[in-house]
Amino acid sequence: MKTNIWITLGIIAAMVVAFLLHNVFPINSPMNEYLEEVEEAIFAGEWPKARSALEKIEREWKRSRLLIEINNSRLDIQEFARTLTLLQAYAKVEDRASAYAQAAHLRERWWGFAE
């Protein structure tokens, strides 16, 4: 009987922690600043600055991915990674329209993690 109570309390505690991480973590990340930085650089055509911001985004993504995976679907994680890869490719060839569209989509995917 005691074991069942401890298991139940452990499950409830894990759910509370997962809920808090899901709703707080992405907002406290510097990712929002990086996303703004890359959008502004793309809009201004400052490609070295855009690529630098993308490096920051990739580092932050690698740092925070594990916590984000706790409460998001594999499809959401894959879509974010795919969008980031496309954005990096567009920045490399300096395709402003496509890069800006992917940057906007990346921001949308990031905020989707906080829903």
Image (spheres, helix red, strand yellow):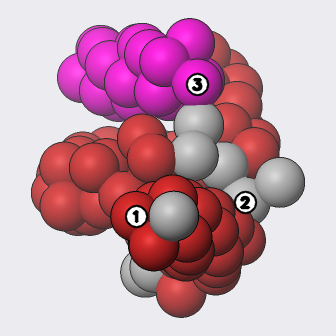
Secondary structure beneath disc 2? loop
Task: Name the front one of labels 3 and 1.
Answer: 1
Query: Which residue is label 2 attached to?
Result: 114
Q: Determine whether 20 is above or below 88 in the image.
A: below
- Residue type beneath disc 3: Ser
Marking on residue 73: 3
Task: Provide the residue span drawn in magenta.
Answer: 73-95
Asked if the residue at tag 2 contacts the one at tag 1, i.e. Cβ–Cβ closer than 8 Å, the answer is: no
Residue positioned 72% across, 60% down in the render: 114
Q: Determine whether 103 is above or below 22 in the image.
A: above
**Left or right of residue 30, residue 36 in this image:** right
In terms of sequence position, does the residue under pointer 1 or pointer 2 come before the other?
Answer: 1
Asked if the residue at tag 1 contacts the one at tag 3, i.e. Cβ–Cβ closer than 8 Å, the answer is: no
Label 3 environment density (alpha carbons within 10 Å; few <14, some 14–19, many ≥20): few
Task: Name the front one of labels 1 and 2.
Answer: 1
**Left or right of residue 42, residue 112 in this image:** right
Q: Could you tell me what secondary structure mostly forms the magenta stretch?
A: helix
Residue positioned 43% across, 81% down in the render: 30
Q: Determine whether 4 is above or below 75 in the image.
A: below
Q: Is residue 113 visible?
A: yes
Residue nearer the viewer, 23 or 54: 23
- Residue type beneath disc 1: Thr
Q: Quadrant of residue 12?
A: bottom right
Alpha-carbon distance for marks 1 and 2? 34 Å
Residue nearer the viewer, 87 or 12: 12
Does the magenta segment cover residue 47?
Answer: no
- Residue type beneath disc 2: Ala
Q: Position of residue 113 (x, y in %)?
A: 66, 49
In terms of sequence position, does the residue under pointer 3 or pointer 1 come before the other?
Answer: 1
Marking on residue 3: 1
Secondary structure beneath disc 3? loop
Label 1 environment density (alpha carbons within 10 Å; few <14, some 14–19, many ≥20): few
